[in-house]
Amino acid sequence: MAAINDSDILGVEGDTSLSEASARDFFALLKPRVMSLVVFTAFAGLVLAPGTLNPILAAIAVLCIAVGAGASGALNMWYDSDIDAVMTRTAKRPIPAGRIRRPEALAFGITLSVFSVAILGLTVNWFSAGFLAFTIFFYAVVYTMWLKRSTPQNIVIGGASGAFPPMIGWACVTGGVSLDSVILFMIIFLWTPAHFWALALFKMGDYGSVGVPMMPNVVGIPSTKRQIFVYAVLTGVFAVAPTFTGLASIWYGLVAAVLSVVFIGYSVAVWRMPADDQRMSSARKMFAYSIFYLFAIFSALLIDHYAMGAATHLAGAL
Ligand code: HEM
Ligand SMILES: CC(C)=CCC/C(C)=C/CC/C(C)=C/COP(=O)(O)OP(=O)(O)O
């Protein structure tokens, strides 16, 4: 599919004046709803990491990761504006709706990327800043420009970018990587296919209309359903792993196990969904639960962390 240019969107060939976009339009370029959960997982990584970070630096770190994540969303919308204009789910986004010009979105994305990485490096550490830069690159270039339109494994490989944020948060504190931060990565990495393919099942028409090779469009519905189940089981295995490495207590493990059994249950319901179910209600429910599930797993890790800290403190005082 050919990329659209300004004149396609605004109908004024050669006009380089600025659009009359509102601050709200630029905010929408940051994909704020999706990125809020991404940033929450980064915050969790920062809190769970061994050691401490000065609260002001921690706030700067979270802000930089949020801005960097948003910047990568803007770059994604800049590149994908041609297909976004065709898909019903995305047609009202600021670029296809004609409220923001592509060069504006590109400049906005690059500027925020550079600032977020530079400020993180100058204030926190350059390892986490490099990691943030790599993650922006991975989502904007590796996933969006390369994999998304070329392989049904696009979100399996490209999904790594959405899984790096807790490792970035962790690296802000420790300056490095550890087994526990890799486990946090694996939880999101393995969760992404179940999260996204559930949506792709009931949005197949959209992706088919723009020729994006999402899994159900390429291998069919039955195979996608089986793969969703396998990834849901693998996600559950990694979700309880923090209990076994000592990052979390047995109580967290029990909560994660219950949440994961429900997640796997939804994937079984999707698997058993009748072929003539036009609405695909099980897939819709699984997609909604997937978001709650990831939020709940990382919330449970945080609550457990603070509860374990309080218990240790109390035991020391007795
Ligand atoms: C390559 C990986 C991923 C893909 C392809 C993907 C795709 C999508 C899509 C297409 C939507 C539909 C809603 C919209 O248009 O905004 C969505 C929603 C959502 N995704 Fe993902 N996602 C991915 C990874 C993630 C990650 C890593 C997170 C968080 C850690 C996440 C969190 C969310 C949330 C919170 C929503 C709901 C947004 C709303 O309420 O509007 N996603 N995702
Ligand atoms: C710190 C940092 C840089 C984090 C990046 C986090 C990240 C990569 C999140 C990916 C989530 C996301 C919006 C996927 C949408 O895929 P899509 O673009 O195919 O969906 P669309 O069709 O809705 O545009």
Image (cartoon, rainbow, N blue to C red):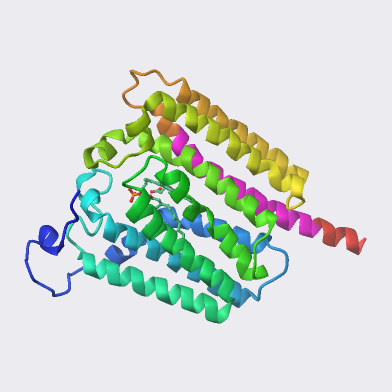
The region drawn magenta spans 286-310
Q: Residue farthest to the right?
A: 318
Q: How many marks?
A: 0
Describe residue 125's horizontal placement relative to residue 276 as left or right. Answer: right
Q: Position of residue 301 (x, y in %)?
A: 66, 51
Describe residue 63's horizontal placement relative to residue 258 as left or right. Answer: left
**Residue 282 seen in render:** no
Q: Nearer the viewer, residue 282 or 71?
A: 71
The overriding secondary structure of the stretch rendered in magenta is: helix
In the image, residue 168 sits, relative to residue 120, either above or below, namely above
Residue in the picture at 56% in, 69% down: 128
Q: Nearer the viewer, residue 266 or 111?
A: 111
In the image, residue 124 sits, relative to residue 158, either above or below, namely below
Q: Position of residue 275 (x, y in %)?
A: 36, 19
Describe residue 12's horizontal placement relative to residue 289 as left or right. Answer: left
Residue 151 figure quarter: top left
Q: Is residue 205 magenta?
A: no
Q: Residue farthest to the bottom?
A: 122
Q: Is residue 306 magenta?
A: yes
The quadrant of the picture occupied by the C terminus is: bottom right
Residue 52 figure quarter: bottom right
Residue in the picture at 17% in, 60% down: 98
In the image, residue 292 sits, relative to residue 277, either above or below, namely below
Q: Nearer the viewer, residue 21 or 132?
A: 132
**Residue 12 seen in render:** yes
Q: Position of residue 287 (x, y in %)?
A: 44, 37
Q: Nearer the viewer, residue 121 or 37?
A: 121
Residue in the picture at 26% in, 36% down: 208
Residue in the picture at 53% in, 59% down: 165
